[in-house]
Image (cartoon, grey):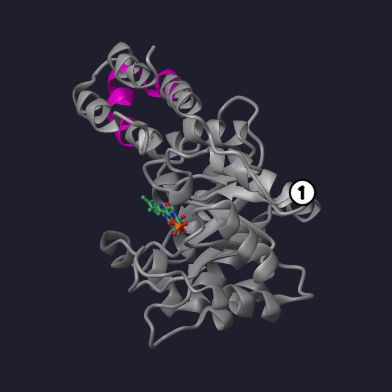
Amino acid sequence: MLYYLHMQEHPLFLAPLAGYTDKAFRQIAHSFGADGSVTEMVSAEGLARDSAKTKALLDRYPGEENLIVQIFAPSEDPVARCLDTLLAFNPSMIDINCGCPVPKVVKTGAGSALMKDPAAAARMVRTIKERTDIPVSVKFRLGWDSSSINYIAFADAVYEAGASVLTLHARTRAQGYAGQADREAFRQLASHMEGSGAFLFASGDIFTPEDAGAVIDGCGMDGVMFARGAIGNPFIFRMAKEYMASGSYALPSAEEKVMTALSHLRLAIDAYGEAVACREMRKQLMAYIKGIEGASRAKASLTQACTEEECRSALLALIGK
Ligand SMILES: Cc1cc2nc3c(=O)[nH]c(=O)nc-3n(C[C@H](O)[C@H](O)[C@H](O)COP(=O)(O)O)c2cc1C
């Protein structure tokens, strides 16, 4: 997978998004040009305990390639114990979450709590590298808060331990998902790692093709991860590729948005059954139709919709079908 990343012009990946980046979303993203995806974060402890619910998060769509599996853990112990189960899924790469700001995760010492303990993150990388040749990546933040910015030292620690791919979400833990991601930090990281052979993904406030161009051409990052910018908008991958090739891009039509939302819903129904999929997909269906005339009426119907047919008629009404 590392070779693949380095051979791509500038890979565009679907970022890990808990509650979103399941196999249905990843398949849709791939159909619009995503070069690969990251699973939502998966508990190393859950895998170590062979939890069926945790393992279900690693399901792939038929033929899925370039899948980075992201795990979270507070220390190397659960990482070591989860590897048999994890490796059986044959991930293209294993990513360690060092960025999740959610208190439930942080208070265990996992996610962005690891920004305070780069040595622990490095031990987790080493634990995986001792067992397998599969590349390891780490997704991390600028630091815990604005008074403890340490992403460069953190990157050095995990790179020296064997991580060959680094994804910087250019916000602190204290910022959560608010405030501007710091593009200057991408520039600093890219210049610091230049010549090291590490592959660098940018994450944070990448919502448009122009944003992707700016962090690649302007900051020297190797690839980008689209996160919130891809929710209800898998077209971003096609648009960004068009933009990078030609300097312009076409927006999706209302019809394309609606038909893609319906294809996404169908894949989710195939995966989870109609009742669960219709409920779980509401927020994403609403994201697809944002900005289309009549969207607020359709949203009201979607809130009540429990079947594929009800979702279909709410969505198709938007395009007069
Ligand atoms: C709903 C949601 C769920 C997320 N889940 C994860 C996750 O499981 N693992 C992870 O590393 N980052 C996760 N993130 C962070 C994103 O991958 C990304 O780094 C962040 O949203 C910044 O990118 P953006 O500003 O372009 O959205 C999540 C973000 C959101 C909004």
| Residue located 45% across and 46% down the image | 40
| Residue located 55% across and 31% down the image | 27
Q: Residue 227: horizontal and vertical position, in percent?
A: 47, 51
| Residue located 40% across and 64% down the image | 111
| In the foreground, 155 or 247 | 247
Q: For mark 1, does the 10 Å Cα neighbourhood hold few (<14), some (14 to 19), or many (20 or more) residues?
A: few
Residue 309 seen from this side: yes
Q: Residue 251: horizontal and vertical position, in percent?
A: 55, 38
Q: Residue furthest bottom?
A: 147
Q: Quadrant location of residue 184? A: bottom right
Q: Quadrant location of residue 60? A: top right
Magenta region: 268-283
Ligand 1 position by quadrant: bottom left
Up-down: is 161 above or below 34?
below
Residue 91 seen from this side: no
Quadrant of image for the C terminus: top left
- Look at mark 1 in the image and give the residue it sits on: 4
Up-down: is 242 above or below 302?
below
Q: Residue 158: horizontal and vertical position, in percent?
A: 60, 72
